[in-house]
Amino acid sequence: MKRYLFLMAFACLSYQLLAQIGINTESPQQLLHVDAKGNTSANSNVSDDVVIDKSGKVGVGVLSPTAKLHIETTVSLPAIHLADGSEGDGKILGSKDANGNMTWLTPPTSWTKVVNFTGGLRNYLNGYSALLLSVQLPESGNYIVMLRWWGTANTSFGLISAYLNIKEGVNNVANDAADVNKDNIEYYIKYPQSGAPFSFTSYLRGSFTANKWLKLYISPSTPMPAGQYSWTIGNTTSKELNPTVIILKI
Amino acid sequence: MRIYTLIFFISIMQFLPAQVGINTQNAYTGSVLHIDPKGNTSGTTNSSDDVLIDASGNIGIGTLLPKAKLDIVKAGTNSPLRIVDGGQGTNKVLKSDTQGNASWMDMPSTSAANYSITGSVLTFNAGTVYLVKAIPISANGFYQIVIRWWGRTWGVNGTGVTAAVFYLASSTGSGNAWTADEPNVKDSAESYVSTNATTDKNSYPFCFALPLSSQAAVETYLKVYIKVGVGGPWKTGEIDAWNANWNPSISVYRI
């Protein structure tokens, strides 16, 4: 009985201090050491090994993990394959909640589109809102519309203005009832001579949803009343002698 | 004594043969370790609860055919993988250091906002610096602003022009504190405007769009100051203090 107790005590002590379990290896180097191919010698041929060390760190392809989960691999074999239904080309690994639960997320991207108004003569009558441009947007995000105007007007009032606004719409139809205004300005230009070119640059911004339409409207104003003169573009086919709109997604 | 030796041997090392099954008597073909917690796996059926190490050392969790060093196939409502390191949070992503250590960081993002300079009549006398707007900064980053001016001047110089310098300064407070903020001006530009040469309020409105740029830190302010240098004074709000089209506005983008 005495011997038996001694044996038990020794066994427990031994387990606590020395127990190392090897699978497919006679020389486990950590608490649990799986050598899948049975070919590990010292620190070579470890790419197939899985270990759990005495701190509970898991090593995959490495015998001495330096993180809770430490994976060593080469480009040809991915470190992690994670299939939860959210996977897709170009997605990045992120958290979907405050608790660090992971899923695949769409990374932010930028985008630009440059539109030159070289499509022929257009007149925009003052007092009336006209659709200059509609673009279906590829992604949700913050958009900047840079307007580089170049045109003429047929008034000698000395001062002209136009309202410019961007709206989010569900189609490319002008003045659609579902359009939602995003940003608007009025821009004044000193303009002493009818028919003379004038140019200016301004900026509009808005948050838009993927697949919606960004619509840019112009409504020439001063001098009022409505219908007495026009802003004109498309006198030439030159890119420089016409307006340009740059749409940026930031 | 033989038992003694045997226990000693087991206690220092346990050598187990290839193909260890836990809770299964049929470890999956070719696997080295196969744990079937529910004990219900047959072939590849009912493997969603299984953990396996295959003959190449690849780990499958919820799959018996890992296609990567660690292959996790989600089953049920639990997330397939969770990392709690104190930095976890919604919409964070993993970033690497030079060693491949992963930690959470905020998903890169942008922002865009407009600030209308409305609500009162403002007078900007020549030679004096005024605070136009203190923009609260909610995230670290690089900021681009565009001052979209809309206003009038009460005076021009002899050639019919007026001009003002705009300053963009970073600051910890929102108040009008030009002396303190002047050393922290990050960008500045002067805008010249040609307008009609009257000295009364019948002068034309004028407009321009002026971009300025600065880096800024969270919980600080980017402050736009104006100093009219030629002509003036400039005024805003006196045609309609509340119409956003008929007053200046500032677009702010974090890129």
Image (cartoon, rainbow, N blue to C red):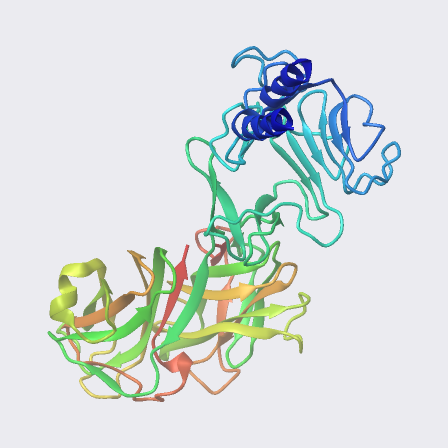
What residue is rendered at 47% in x and 74% in y? A184
**Is B128 positioned to the left or the right of A204 in the image?**
left
Please indicate, yes or no, whether residue A169 appears anywhere in the rendered image: yes
Picture coordinates of residue A66 (x, y %)?
Answer: 47, 31
Residue situated in front as seen by the camera: B255 or B107: B107
What residue is rendered at 89% in x and 34% in y? B42
What residue is rendered at 85% in x and 37% in y? B41
Can you tell which quarter of the image residue B119 is in? bottom left
**Is B254 positioned to the left or the right of A181 in the image?**
left
Picture coordinates of residue B236 (x, y %)?
Answer: 28, 82
**Is A164 positioned to the left or the right of B199 in the image?**
right
| Number of marks in the rendered image | 0
Please indicate, yes or no, whether residue A151 appears anywhere in the rendered image: no
Residue situated in front as seen by the camera: B53 or B87: B53
In this rendering, is residue A217 above or below B103? below
In this rendering, is residue B92 above or below A8? below
Picture coordinates of residue A194 (x, y %)?
Answer: 40, 72
Picture coordinates of residue A162 (x, y %)?
Answer: 45, 75
For the C terminus of chain B, the image quarter is bottom left
For the N terminus of chain B, the image quarter is top right
Residue situated in front as seen by the camera: B60 or B27: B27
Can you tell which quarter of the image residue B113 is in? bottom left
